[in-house]
Image: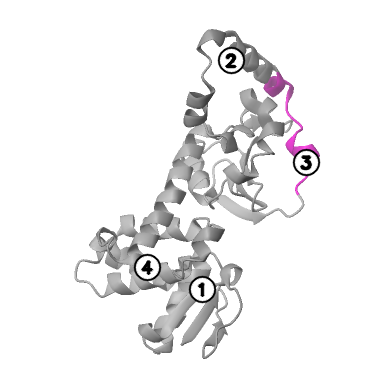
Amino acid sequence: MKVLVCENSIDGIFSGIYRAYDSRYGHNSIRLTTLDVLDGYELFCEYEEVPVNPENSRKVADTLHNRMGQEVYSEICHAINAYEAEKDKRKNISKAEAVYKTVVLGLSMEQSSKILNYLGNPYVARVFQLARSAGNEAHHLLGFLRFSELENGTLFARIHPRNNVLTVLAEHFADRLPMENFIIYDENRKTAALHKKGSGYLLAEVPDADEEFMNRFSDKEKEYRQLWLEFFHSIAIEARKNPRLQRQNIPRRFRQDTVELAHERDSIAGHKTERNY
């Protein structure tokens, strides 16, 4: 068995898929995995580390887009960006393997665009589950994400997502706020989407973020925060307080990044199990 080890990213897994096809070992003799879920080495397996190759990744992306359509391509990308929980890593179907075998099956079909309907296939079902998890969180964050104005006029938002949904958010707000300078910072992965007004966005690794800079709000921002907090508390009806319903509408793990619920940050820190970080 040939095991291809790739980076846990879209370019990394697509590079691995390209290498699997190019090797001509036969798909039944190849497995795909990522560095972060590789848990030791198995006997009678040959391991090969596949470096990220943007050109090969682009070729795979173009093939999937042209053969399977935009919808399936987007779902596969969502699945690759999904968080792989510890309990899921023990299911013997890693994220990379599920995506690889789904692509192989899809490209062998006459109607490749229908591949995600075959949920009886364990690989397709796994891709569907991962894509739904990432897609749902991205949908929530599009509503929960809050921008704050910094002293220099830049809009700044901090997020703590389970899944890697930064590109989805960056594309959405680049389209909605094309003439604003903004930063969306994923604190879990230490990455940021940087958008300059009138142009596109770029992703950057930020291993040592400047907390002082990120909390240096403009005077107008501080004023509006105070007004919003007063409004939020003034409309609350104590007799109708329903914490259970509040948790359904905005789960605890999203609250640390909202102004009106910032007082819950200390209590949120104790809910590691619920947040699954």
C-alpha distance separating marks 1 and 3: 35 Å
Q: Quadrant of residue 223?
A: top right
**Which label is found at residue 58?**
none
Rendered residue at 55%/88% (across/down): 43
| Amino acid type shown at disc 4 | Asp
Circle 1: element type: strand
Q: Is residue 154 above or below residue 189?
A: above
C-alpha distance separating marks 1 and 4: 22 Å
In the rendered view, does 22 fall on the left or right side of 110?
right
Q: Which residues are magenta?
A: 209-222
| Amino acid type shown at disc 3 | Glu
Mark 1 and mark 2 lie on one chain; the one further toward the N terminus is 1
Question: Where does the image place residue 267, in percent across and percent down from the top left?
Answer: 68, 32
In the rendered view, does 21 fall on the left or right side of 5?
left
- Label 1: few (<14), some (14–19) or many (≥20) C-alpha neighbours in 10 Å: many
Circle 4: element type: helix
Q: Is residue 69 above or below residue 153?
A: below
Contact? badges 1 and 3 (CB < 8 Å): no
Residue 220 lies in magenta, yes or no? yes
In the rendered view, does 276 fall on the left or right side of 26?
right
Disc 1 target residue: 33
Tell which tag, 4 or 2, sits nearer the viewer. Answer: 2
Disc 3 target residue: 211
Disc 2 target residue: 232
